[in-house]
Amino acid sequence: MAAGPGDPGLLTLAGHAALAQSRFVLAPATFRRSFAALLEGKEVESPFQMAHASVVAWVEERLPRGGVTFLLPGDFGSFSPFQSFVAHFGDRARVVPGVGAHAAAAAVLKKTFDLAGVAHATVLTSPRAFTAEGRVRLARYAQPGHTLVVYMNDLPLPRLVEELREGFGRDVPIALLEELSCPGERVTCGTLGTICDLVGDRDPFGIDSSNPEPTLALVVAGEALGADEDPSWWDRRYEKLWKPRGVR
Ligand SMILES: C[S@@+](CC[C@H](N)C(=O)[O-])C[C@H]1O[C@@H](n2cnc3c(N)ncnc32)[C@H](O)[C@@H]1O
């Protein structure tokens, strides 16, 4: 079940019900802390300290005795390494949607990423994505008209900025969002020209860190962050789409 970016308040009602009904839970450390009240009385284990076959065996062994919930960070639809478990359990698996980090970022920034007249595509990617070719080149996706959302960045900030500038072709707005919806939430907004100075010596991506917990940092870049939608776009939709069809 997708558990959102960290705050139990961002769990869906369906997720809350599924968790309440389960006796056994697989949950990363961050959720074991923030969801402590919801996990009381349940047997809880970290999935990240077991190989695939052991996770499957852990779940299979408990299923006859009660419901098992797997708490996934954010949403299942982006950068979730759990597809193979859904395939294994087939009809016995149910996926509950959740709030992805990019949705939490849009809310904190109060920005729609596909903004009429400004950006027509939101690209979710990561330089660390697992591809046959190896590393993803962000410049390929950082294009005018796109809002780029970078998950799991492992490039030093100046290098990330360089790749984004190469793609966008100019110093577009950029936001760095750390620990969204968690107690340490921190948001830094600037442009590709200013962000390195604004972040200074900090290492928000934990590149040189040996901390056993994953670093939670998301990057969003593109013109949409610095723009607002012209109100006439509402009227265009109203006149061309909603009014002719009597949309209610
Ligand atoms: C393995 S991916 C999981 C993404 C998740 N499936 C989602 O939909 O948000 C982990 C990455 O998601 C981003 N992330 C997840 N939770 C976050 C949070 N609370 N604040 C900032 N970034 C977060 C970070 O980029 C982190 O490196």
Image (cartoon, rainbow, N blue to C red):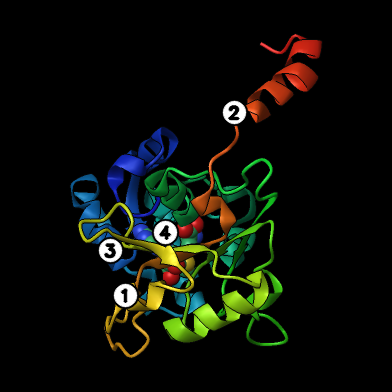
Tell me the distance, in whole angstroms, between the alpha carbons under discs 2 and 4. Answer: 36 Å
Q: Nearer the viewer, mark 2 or mark 4?
A: 2
Q: Is mark 4 within 8 Å of ligand 1?
A: yes
Mark 3: give few (<14), some (14-19) or many (20+) Cα within 10 Å.
some
Mark 3 or mark 2, earlier in chain: 3
Mark 4 or mark 3, earlier in chain: 3
The residue sitting at 29% across, 49% down in the picture is: 7
Amino acid under label 1? Val
Mark 4 or mark 1, earlier in chain: 4
Q: Determine the secondary structure under disc 3.
A: helix
Mark 1: give few (<14), some (14-19) or many (20+) Cα within 10 Å.
some
Mark 3 or mark 1, earlier in chain: 3
Amino acid under label 3? Thr
Q: Determine the secondary structure under disc 4.
A: loop
The residue sitting at 72% across, 87% down in the picture is: 133
User: Quick check: marks 4 and 3 in contact, CB under 8 Å?
Assistant: yes
Tell me the distance, in whole angstroms, between the alpha carbons under discs 3 and 2. Answer: 41 Å
Residue 100: where, in percent of width, then height?
A: 48, 52
Q: Is residue 79 left or right of residue 131?
A: left
Nearer to us in this view, 131 or 172: 172
Q: Residue 97, can we see it?
A: yes
Q: Determine the secondary structure under disc 2.
A: loop
Read off the residue under disc 4: 73
Answer above or below: position of 140 versus 117: below
Q: Is residue 101 left or right of residue 79?
A: left
Nearer to us in this view, 176 or 206: 176
Which image quarter has ligand 1?
bottom left
Read off the residue under disc 3: 30
Q: Is mark 3 within 8 Å of ligand 1?
A: yes
Q: Determine the secondary structure under disc 1.
A: helix
Read off the residue under disc 2: 231
